[in-house]
Image: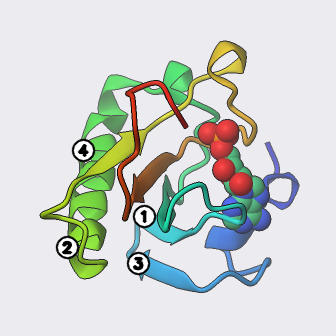
Amino acid sequence: MDRKDCVFCRIADRDIPSPLLYEDEEIVAFNDLHPQAPVHILIIPRKHLPSLAEMEEADAALLGKMAFVAKQLAEEKGISESGYRLICNCRADAGQEVPHIHVHLLGGENLGPLLAK
Ligand code: AMP
């Protein structure tokens, strides 16, 4: 896929302006456009992977690093003690809307039951 056709690639490439809360050579994080909790951050790899289903073993460290970035952002946002949730929707039945793998970091309030989004 051309990076120009992917909204999250374009944010990572700074084609679409969105303040980056974290960035390094592999990973970018930014606020969700339609937040569903007081803290709602998306953590993505710069590499275009459509979903978890396309992940290969070589990508395992990248996904681990995304979780670590989420942990650091949770600390920065002051929600580490109260708690938070990471969600990674995969394909249609999970309601994945954007076909570029991403982890939602949600927190800042009681999030309710596990499957509530
Ligand atoms: P998912 O359903 O897991 O694919 O979630 C996609 C998320 O991306 C949704 O929560 C959207 O609100 C969010 N989103 C879509 N476009 C943008 C954008 N341009 N900037 C930030 N978040 C976005």
**Distance between the alpha carbons at the discs numbered 3 and 2:** 13 Å
Q: Amino acid at mark 3?
A: Tyr
Q: Are marks 3 and 1 in contact (CB under 8 Å)?
A: yes
| Residue 59 visible somewhere in the drawing | yes
Pointer 3 or 2: first along the chain: 3
From this viewpoint, which residue is outermost toward the top? 93
Say whether disc 1 or disc 2 marks the residue closer to the N-terminus.
1
User: Viewed as shown, does residue 90 lie left or right of 83?
Assistant: right
Which comes before the other along the chain, label 4 or label 2? Answer: 4
How many angstroms separate mark 1 from mark 2 (CA)? 17 Å
What residue did someone put label 2 on? 75
- Looking at the image, residue 116 sits to the left or right of residue 73; the answer is right
The quarter of the picture where the C terminus appears is: top right
For the N terminus, which image quadrant? top right
Q: Is residue 90 left or right of residue 27?
A: right
Image depth: mark 3 or mark 1 in front: 3
Task: Report the residue marked by disc 4.
Answer: 64
Which mark is on residue 22?
3
Which is nearer the N-term, disc 4 or disc 3?
3
Left/right of residue 22 with respect to residue 83 in the rendered view: right
Q: Residues within 10 Å of mark 1 (few under 14, many from 20)?
A: some
Residue depth check, mark 3 versus mark 2: number of the one nearer the observer: 2
Q: Which mark is residue 27?
A: 1
Amino acid type assigned to the residue bearing label 4 in the image: Gly
